[in-house]
Image (tube, rainbow, N blue to C red):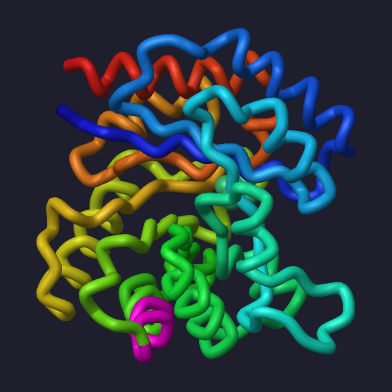
Amino acid sequence: MKKFLIAGNWKMFTNVFESKVLVETLIANIWKDNQNTTVLVCPPFTSLCGVADVIKDTDLKLGAQNCHYEEKGAYTGEISPQMLQYLGCNYIIIGHSERRTHFKEDDEIIARKLSSILDLGLIPILCIGETFEQRMNNMTNTILTKQIEKAFENIDKSLIKQVVIAYEPVWAIGTGISATPEQAQETHRWVKDFISSTYSVNREDLTVIYGGSMNDKNCYELLNLADVDGGLIGGASLNAETFTSIIETAKSISKI
Ligand code: PEP
């Protein structure tokens, strides 16, 4: 029986009032029989408190879209993983391509964040992925190798199985063009094989989710793939009906 993680990355959308309405609608839509599908919402920082309050008696999980690697300090405008833990976040997304590109986050910064999150017992969602140009030049596996090796360099290797990997081809994020099922399966299989052989981790203990224009139309094909353990969903998670439909699809596959 397959288990899924379906995560909504709301990016910089929804103020606190809109966030609460979105999550209330979601709860009303999906809140039954969810054992094999973990549903996670990652609203903007300013909505975390409000959303935490709405979901407190449900199985819905709360995540943040980013964090700093330090616990506290003179880092104006930053938020620490400890602060997020106090708000009830179980997951933190790191290394999203939008942060790598717009905020110049490199593999070293991402590695420090990963380590801080793991130290607290929280679950990092580590985003990795290649650009279109890199894929065209057959560099996908080289790029992913570098991103993974750098992220895992300084952590206790026994913690690797706690890390959720989100394979997000950069060219598929927000473009409406998702990876084909063949591309997604091939890359997910490679990621699992690479991590399990390099770090001696059981392949079955790894969680690799797909992100990049997943929606209610293409989710069945993508979630049905052998090595896809869920989705990180941006645009389509902002609409309660569409996100519900993706969750229901995951639930139905997990019962097969
Ligand atoms: C994302 O933000 O991680 C993402 C995959 O976005 P979208 O689903 O909109 O492509």
Q: Which residue range is magenta in the image?
A: 147-154
* Image quarter (top left, top right, bottom left or bottom right) of the N terminus: top left
Residue 100 relative to residue 252: left or right: right
- The location of residue 232, given as percent across then percent down, is 51, 44
236 is higher (above) or lower (below) than 109: above
- Residue 151 appears in the picture as rendered: yes
**Magenta-drawn stretch contains 151:** yes
18 over 123 or under it: above or below: above
- In the displayed structure, 119 sits above or below 208; it is below
- The main secondary structure of the magenta stretch is helix
The image shows residue 145 at horizontal and vertical percentages of 33, 79
Residue 228, percent across and down? 29, 43
Q: Residue at x 32, y 61 (%)?
A: 162
Q: Considering depth in this image, is 183 or 212 the residue closer to the camera?
A: 212
Relative depth, front residue between 127 and 87: 87
Q: Which image quadrant for residue 254?
A: top left
Q: Quadrant of residue 102?
A: bottom right
Image-based side of 223 in relation to 130, left or right: left
Image coordinates of residue 66 in percent, x first then y, are: 66, 64
The C terminus - image quarter: top left
Q: Give yes or no for residue 17 being in the magenta stretch.
A: no
The residue that appears at 71% across and 32% down in the rendered structure is 53
Q: Residue at x 52, y 30 (%)?
A: 60
Q: Name the residue: 10% across, 61% down.
A: 202
Q: How many marks?
A: 0
Which quarter of the picture shows residue 56? top right
Asked whether residue 175 appears in the rendered view, the answer is no
